[in-house]
Image: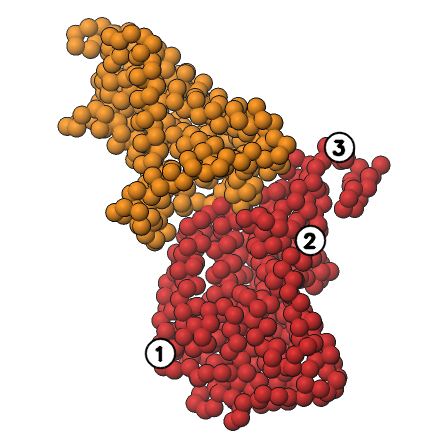
C-alpha cells in the first residue's frame, strides 16, 4: 500500500518511519545562493525532492510596471547576474524590435563580442563551481584566474564588472577602442592554451568521470516536459539554440556550431559547455575580424519612447538557456506588464523528477550541473 | 634490544614527561603542517597563501590558534551533552598514544613494544568511536550522516590497511630470522616497529621495492582512514556542510582539526616505517631521515588533496570491497607463498 508523505506519494517498498526529511539550504555551501531543497531521504537515497524558492525575490517584474522603459535598463543585468551583459542587451533588442529601431552594424558586432565574452565568463564560473561541488578545489581558482581577465576587459569599456548597463536602445553606450580588441584577442589566445590543461586536469580525471558519467540523466522527453533549455537541453541531443533557431542581433552573419551530446548526463552537460566556450571564442574572433567602422547608436540618445500597443515576446540565448522578455504595452511609456522568462526556473523545475532515486552526493552534482542562478529564478 | 630513552626514570614521571613531550611535538607538527598545507595549496592554485602575519605569514597559524582558543564554545540546544563534550577527547587521545610508539631512530623511541604495529592500528580504530559520538551527540542530520559515512568508511578501509601491513610483518619475520646486530643475535618480531626498520636497514633494501602493491594499498587506505581527499566524504563540505563536526566551534573544533592533521602525520610515519626504511639513510642522522621521509609522504597527501575531486560514497565502498580488499588478500597470499618457497 502506498503512503502519503509531506511531499506526495511514497512507493510501497518504503516504510515512512524509516525515512527522514533534510532541509538542504537556503544556507548551504553548495546551493548556489539561496536555493532550498527539501529532501525526503531513506539513508542517503532521495525518495522525493522539493525545491523551495523565493529567498532572493526582489520584484523586478513589478518594478518594471512603475518605471518607464529606459529606467528599467539597469534592472535587467541584475536578474541573471552571470549573464548580465546578455540579459541587458536582450532587453534592448526586444525594445528595438518592438519599436522597429535600427541598430548600426558596428554596435551589433560590439554586442556580439561583449555577449560572447560574457558567455565564456559565465561558463568558466560554472565550470569552477561545479568542480567545487564535486570536491575539487583547485580548478575553481584556475577558472577565476581566466574569468578575472574577461571581467577586467569588459570593465574597461562598460564601467562595471558584473551588472552591466552597456546596451542602449539602438546601440551601445560607449565605443570600443584598439586596446579592447587587443586585450580580447590576447585573452582568447590565452584561453585556447588553457583548454588542454582543463582537459587533462579535469575531463580526463577518473574520479571526475566516475562522478559524472550516467549521473542525472535529463532525457529529451523530460527536457520537453519541463521546457529545459540551454546546455542541459543540448546535452540531451536537441540542437536547439535561440541564436540559430530564431537568429537575432546579427548572429546569422557569423559561422558557429551548436555543440550537442546525446547522453544527457552531467558529463554531457560538462562537455557541451566546454565546446560552447570554444564556439564563443570563434564568434568573438570573427566579430573582431569584421568589426566595421561607423556609429554605435542612434544620433540622438533615446530617453523616452512609447512602443505601439500590443503584446510582444522576444527570446535570446543566455549562458543558461532561452531567456525571454514578454511585454504588454498600452502605448504609454511604461509597460503594463513585463514578464521575464528565465531558463534557470524551467531547468530547476525538472529537478524533482531527475533527483528522485539518486544519492545525496549526486544531488549536489546534478543541481550544480544544470547551472542555476538563484536571483534569476526569483527575479 | 635498543634501550628506550626513559628507562632510567621513575615510571610515572617518565610517562608524564613522555605525554607532555608528545603533545608538544604533535602541536608543533600540526602547526607546521597547517602552514605547509596552506602554502602548498596556494602554490598549486597559483596564489600567495598567508603573507600578512610575520614574514611569509609564518605567524598566521599562531594567530589562528589564539583566535580558536579565545572563541566562545557553543553548545547547541538538544545535544547529548556527555557525548557531545567527550567526542573531541575520544578522537584526540588515541592520536597521542599512537604517536608515542614511533621509532624515530635507532634507540630513539619512547616506548618499545613487540606489538607496536598492532597497537597503532588499534589506536587508529578508536578514532571512529569519537567521530561517531560527535555525529550522534550533535543532534544534527548533517553531522549524523557524516558520522555514519565515517564509520562505514573507516571500518572498511581498515581491512586493506591491515592486510597490506601484514605482508610486511610476514617478510620481517622471515628475513629477520637469525639476524645479528653488533655480533649479538636478536630475536626479531614482525610487529615491532623498530624491528621492521632494523631489518630494512640491515638488508639495505626498503620494503617498497619488494612490496610495491602493498605500499600503494597502504597509502590509499591511509588516505581514506585520515579522511583526506579524494576520500574526505565524512566531512564533504559541499554536501554535508562540515560532516561530523558541523556543530563544533572554537577549541572543540580545533581539537578535531588537530587530530585530523596528526592522523595524517601518523599515517605517514607508519608508512615510512613499513615501506621506506624508517630512519635508514646515508650521511644524515636517523631522525632527520625519518622526518624527511614522513614529510615527503605528507606532501604527497596534500598534493593529492588539492588536485582531485571527491569520490561518491558508494563508489568509495565499491572500490574498497571489490578492488582493494581482494588485491591485498592476493598480495598477502603471494607473499606467504614466496616466503615459504624461498
Along the viewing direction, whichever of A80 and A132 lies nearer the viewer: A80
Relative side of A304 to B267, left or right: right
Which residue carries the number 3 mark?
Answer: A17
Residue reaching furthest left?
B283
Going 59% across and 35% down the picture, which residue do you hit? Answer: B76
Kindly identify which chain the residue marked by label 1 belongs to. Answer: A
Q: Earlier in the sequence, mark 1 or mark 3?
A: 3
Q: Earlier in the sequence, mark 2 or mark 3?
A: 3
Label 3 secondary element: helix
Along the viewing direction, whichever of B140 and A254 lies nearer the viewer: B140
Going 30% across and 35% down the picture, which residue do you hit? Answer: B296
Name above or below for residue A74 compared with residue B285.
below
Kindly identify which chain the residue marked by label 2 belongs to. Answer: A
- The answer to whether residue B318 is visible is no
Name above or below for residue B5 compared with residue A359.
above
Q: Are marks 1 and 2 in contact (CB under 8 Å)?
A: no
Mark 2 vs mark 3, foreground winner is 2
Amino acid at each position: 500500500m502506498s503512503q502519503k508523505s509531506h511531499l506526495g506519494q511514497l512507493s510501497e517498498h518504503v516504510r515512512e518511519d524509516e525515512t527522514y526529511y533534510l532541509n538542504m539550504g537556503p544556507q548551504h555551501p553548495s546551493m548556489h545562493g539561496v536555493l532550498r531543497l527539501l529532501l525526503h531521504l531513506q539513508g542517503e537515497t532521495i525518495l522525493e525532492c522539493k525545491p523551495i524558492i523565493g529567498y532572493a525575490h526582489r520584484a523586478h517584474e513589478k518594478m518594471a510596471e512603475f518605471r518607464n522603459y529606459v529606467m528599467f535598463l539597469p534592472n535587467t543585468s541584475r536578474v541573471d547576474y552571470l549573464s548580465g551583459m546578455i540579459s541587458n542587451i536582450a532587453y534592448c533588442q526586444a525594445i528595438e524590435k518592438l519599436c522597429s529601431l535600427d541598430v548600426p552594424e558596428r554596435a551589433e558586432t560590439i554586442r556580439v563580442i561583449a555577449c560572447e565574452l560574457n558567455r565564456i565568463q559565465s561558463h568558466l564560473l560554472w565550470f569552477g563551481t561545479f568542480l567545487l561541488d564535486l570536491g575539487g578545489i583547485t580548478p575553481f581558482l584556475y577558472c577565476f584566474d581566466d574569468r578575472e581577465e574577461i571581467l577586467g576587459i569588459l570593465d574597461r569599456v562598460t564601467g562595471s564588472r558584473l551588472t552591466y548597463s552597456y546596451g542602449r536602445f539602438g546601440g551601445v553606450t560607449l565605443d570600443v577602442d584598439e586596446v579592447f580588441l587587443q586585450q580580447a584577442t590576447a585573452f582568447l589566445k590565452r584561453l585556447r592554451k588553457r583548454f588542454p590543461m582543463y582537459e587533462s586536469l579535469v575531463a580526463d580525471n577518473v574520479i571526475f568521470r566516475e562522478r559524472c558519467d550516467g549521473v542525472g540523466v535529463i532525457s529529451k522527453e523530460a527536457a520537453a516536459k519541463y521546457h529545459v533549455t540551454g546546455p542541459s537541453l543540448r546535452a540531451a541531443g536537441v540542437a536547439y539554440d535561440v541564436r540559430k533557431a530564431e537568429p537575432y542581433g546579427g548572429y546569422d552573419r557569423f559561422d558557429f556550431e551548436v555543440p550537442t551530446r546525446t547522453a544527457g548526463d552531467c558529463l554531457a552537460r560538462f562537455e557541451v559547455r566546454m565546446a560552447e566556450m570554444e564556439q564563443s571564442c570563434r564568434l568573438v574572433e570573427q566579430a573582431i575580424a569584421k568589426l566595421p567602422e561607423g556609429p554605435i547608436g542612434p544620433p540622438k540618445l533615446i530617453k523616452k519612447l512609447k512602443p505601439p500597443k500590443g503584446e510582444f515576446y522576444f527570446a535570446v540565448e543566455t549562458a543558461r538557456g532561452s531567456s525571454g522578455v514578454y511585454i504588454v504595452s498600452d502605448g504609454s511609456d511604461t509597460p503594463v506588464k513585463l514578464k521575464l522568462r528565465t531558463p534557470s526556473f524551467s531547468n530547476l523545475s525538472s529537478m524533482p523528477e531527475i533527483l528522485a532515486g539518486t544519492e545525496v552526493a549526486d544531488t549536489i552534482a546534478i543541481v550544480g550541473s544544470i547551472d542555476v542562478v538563484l536571483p534569476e529564478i526569483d527575479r | 634490544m635498543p634501550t628506550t630513552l626513559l628507562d632510567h626514570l621513575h615510571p610515572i614521571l617518565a610517562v608524564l614527561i613522555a605525554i607532555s613531550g608528545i603533545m608538544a611535538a604533535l602541536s608543533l607538527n600540526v602547526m607546521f603542517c597547517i602552514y605547509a598545507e596552506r602554502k602548498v595549496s596556494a602554490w598549486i592554485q597559483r596564489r600567495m597563501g598567508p603573507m600578512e602575519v610575520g614574514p611569509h605569514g609564518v605567524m598566521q597559524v599562531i594567530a589562528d590558534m589564539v583566535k580558536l582558543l579565545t572563541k566562545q564554545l557553543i553548545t547547541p540546544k538538544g545535544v547529548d551533552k556527555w557525548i557531545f563534550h567527550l567526542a573531541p577527547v575520544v578522537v584526540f587521545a588515541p592520536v597521542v598514544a599512537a604517536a608515542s610508539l614511533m621509532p624515530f631512530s635507532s634507540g630513539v623511541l619512547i616506548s618499545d613494544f613487540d606489538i607496536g604495529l598492532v597497537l597503532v592500528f588499534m589506536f587508529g580504530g578508536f578514532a571512529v568511536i569519537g567521530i561517531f559520538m560527535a555525529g550522534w551527540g550533535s543532534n544534527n542530520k548533517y553531522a549524523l550522516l557524516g558520522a555514519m559515512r565515517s564509520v562505514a568508511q573507516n571500518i572498511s578501509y581498515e581491512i586493506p590497511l591491515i592486510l597490506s601491513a601484514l605482508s610486511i610483518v610476514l617478510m620481517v619475520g622471515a628475513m629477520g630470522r637469525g639476524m645479528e646486530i653488533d655480533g649479538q643475535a636478536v630475536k626479531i618480531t614482525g610487529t615491532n616497529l623498530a624491528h621492521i626498520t632494523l631489518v630494512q636497514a640491515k638488508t639495505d633494501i626498503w620494503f617498497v621495492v619488494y612490496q610495491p602493491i602493498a605500499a600503494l594499498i597502504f597509502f590509499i587506505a591511509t588516505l581514506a582512514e585520515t579522511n583526506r581527499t579524494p576520500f574526505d566524504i565524512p566531512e564533504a563540505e559541499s554536501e554535508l556542510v562540515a560532516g561530523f563536526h558541523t556543530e563544533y566551534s572554537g577549541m572543540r573544533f580545533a581539537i578535531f582539526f588537530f587530530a585530523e592533521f596528526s592522523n595524517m602525520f601518523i599515517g605517514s610515519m607508519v608508512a615510512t616505517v613499513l615501506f621506506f626504511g624508517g630512519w635508514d639513510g646515508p650521511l644524515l642522522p636517523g631522525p632527520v631521515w625519518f622526518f624527511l621521509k614522513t614529510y615527503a609522504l605528507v606532501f604527497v597527501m596534500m598534493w593529492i588533496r588539492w588536485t582531485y575531486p571527491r569520490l561518491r560514497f558508494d563508489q568509495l565502498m565499491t572500490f574498497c570491497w571489490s578492488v582493494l580488499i581482494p588485491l591485498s588478500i592476493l598480495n598477502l597470499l603471494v607473499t606467504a607463498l614466496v616466503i615459504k618457497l624461498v
